[in-house]
Amino acid sequence: MTGFLLQLGGPLQSWGEHSAFTDRDTVAHPTRSGLIGMFASALGIPRADATVSPAAVPDAGDTPDFARLTRLRFTVRTDRPGVRLRDFHTVGGGYPQHRTVPTAKGARRSGDTATIVSRRHYLSDAVFTVAVTASQPDAPLLTACAEALAAPRWPLHLGRRSCPPGALLLLRTGVLDPVAELDRVPLARQVPWASAEGADEEATVLVRFTADVPFPPGPGDAPSSRTSVTTLNDEPIRLTARDRTYHARPSYTTSRRLPADLCGGYGSEYLDALDAYLHAPRPGGNEGKAP
């Protein structure tokens, strides 16, 4: 199972799952709809074409389309969960009536109702490492997506247009087993104090993983890694400008202990750890590469 690795980090992220009207939520990790939408933007797929039949997905072809993007599978490692932030936002206040926000019927709001208040939720300083995979017939789709992310047609964002990705986005391409590789990519978090002091050479850190398919069997995995205990309403059916429709899908989670020395720290310290990982010798000499 080949694929590639992403790192989603930036000042802000927002992955809405049941946002409506003036309350814009975020879940604790990237959603399928948000990631597929980002890939569609990178490929230059117009919103008018961002639709898929709920009954069937077309066979693989040479040209990626929105329907084929739903074949992708995502396994998300939470490096840093971030801090939840809520933005108190107003629109349309202080203007004369002819410049206020239009109503659904096309009229203008009166001075008493001109100001619309919304609350928008974000994850601040969060970092996620994502394994992107697909079945063997869709290997060309993975290649096309990785190339598009390296040189996107349109700007990319982490769930909302006000949330651009950081400089590190596409970590590695052509990885033979990206899900297993998540246990080896440096973690974007501080080394635990005990390990840093050398008090416990066998120290580990608890890391959370989420996926849209069951995890392979592993020692110590939670029951939720194989049997879904929750659903998310983030399987995109249509992402057109005025008609966004999603289906619910099962979500799988587990927490796994990884070696504490996998923690790369922050800032330049983490970049050094990531550079050492990306340029380390690989089995066979060329398995996976940095973009």
Image (tube, rainbow, N blue to C red):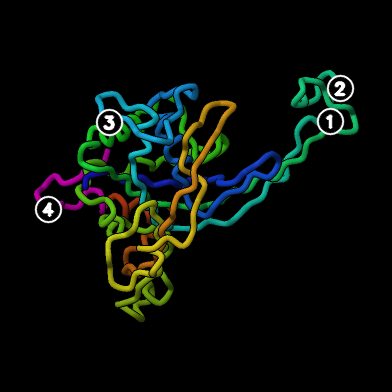
Amino acid type at image mark 2: Gln
Q: Is residue 64 above or below residue 202?
A: above
Cα–Cα span, label 4 and label 1 = 63 Å
Number of numbered callouts drawn: 4
For mark 4, give the secondary structure. Answer: loop
For mark 2, give the secondary structure. Answer: helix
* Residue 97, label in figure: 2
Q: Nearer the viewer, mark 4 or mark 2?
A: 2
Asked if labels 2 and 3 touch by Cβ distance under 8 angstroms, the answer is no
- Which x, y percent locates residue 205? 39, 70
For marks 2 and 1, the one nearer the N-term is 2
Cα–Cα span, label 3 and label 2 = 52 Å
Which quarter of the figure has residue 71? Answer: top left
* Disc 1 target residue: 114
* Residue 283, label in figure: 4
Q: Residue furthest front?
A: 55
For marks 3 and 1, the one nearer the N-term is 3
Q: Nearer the viewer, mark 3 or mark 1?
A: 3
Q: Residue at left 40%, top 35%?
A: 55
Amino acid type at image mark 1: Ala
Which of the two residues, 221 or 128, is positioned nearer the viewer here? 221
Residue range highlighted in magenta: 276-291
* Disc 3 target residue: 59
